[in-house]
Image: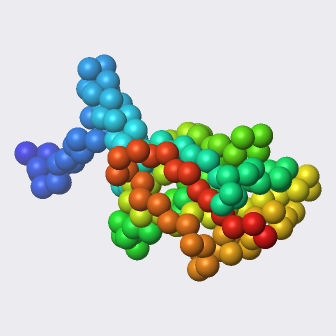
């Protein structure tokens, strides 16, 4: 037996790695479909339930707030899902002509507010986006706002009354 034949008998045979084996068309379709399904699931789910909300903001006597722009924010008071996953506040523009709001957004346009207890912030702005005094400053801070609502229990329409400045 020639020496080369003897040497080749003792060489380890190369192993074929399954990832290097060419995929058939069907196999490639399966891999791509699984990848697309996994990508679609990443980051798309919301750990906090959201519901559409609407309402009206006026002074305590029922009169409209004379501001150029008013923003309402519902700040959830529920526990975080984990160290990195906290509920987002819902924001809505108030129609200053009648004091109503109905298109609250937390993640996607109009998706609503987080179910559970929420503190409510109300802030008024002028033409230059400066905060004005039509809404007292107490309503613009989470530490001082007296407005609280429970989202997701019955009607999700909230009539909010604030004190005149």
Q: Is residue 116 left or right of residue 126?
A: left
Q: Quadrant of residue 147?
A: bottom right
Q: What residue lies at 68% left-to-right and 57% top-to-bottom? A: 61
Q: What residue lies at 31% left-to-right and 19% top-to-bottom?
A: 25
Q: Return the residue nearer the eye: 44 or 119.
A: 119
Left or right of 68? Residue 1 is left
| Side of 97 where 143 appears, left or right | left
Q: Position of residue 138 (x, y in %)?
A: 68, 75
Report the side of 58 relative to 112 (left or right): right
Residues 118 and 60: in front is 60
| Residue visible at 40% across and 73% down in the picture | 83
Q: Quadrant of residue 71?
A: bottom right
Residue 67 in the image: state x and y as whole percent. Answer: 83, 53
Image quarter of the C terminus: bottom right
Name the residue rendered at 17%, 54% in the picture: 11
Residue furthest to the right:
128
Question: Which residue is outermost to the bottom?
Answer: 143
Residue 154 rendering spot, x and y as whole percentages: 35, 47
């Amino acid at each position: 037996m020639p020496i080369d034949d003897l040497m080749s008998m003792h060489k380890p045979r190369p192993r074929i790695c399954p990832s290097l084996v060419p995929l058939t068309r069907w196999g490639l379709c399966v891999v791509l479909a699984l990848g697309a399904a996994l990508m679609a699931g990443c980051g798309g789910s919301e750990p906090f339930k959201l519901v559409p909300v609407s309402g009206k903001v006026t002074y305590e006597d029922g009169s409209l707030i004379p501001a150029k722009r008013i923003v309402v924010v519902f700040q959830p008071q529920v526990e975080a899902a984990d160290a990195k996953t906290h509920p987002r506040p819902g924001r809505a523009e108030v129609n200053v002509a009648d004091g109503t709001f109905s298109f609250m957004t937390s993640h996607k346009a109009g998706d609503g507010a987080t179910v559970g207890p929420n503190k409510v912030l109300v802030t008024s702005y002028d033409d230059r986006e400066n905060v004005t005094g039509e809404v007292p400053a107490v309503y613009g801070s989470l530490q001082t706002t007296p407005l609280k609502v429970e989202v997701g229990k019955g009607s999700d329409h909230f009539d909010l009354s604030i004190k005149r400045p």
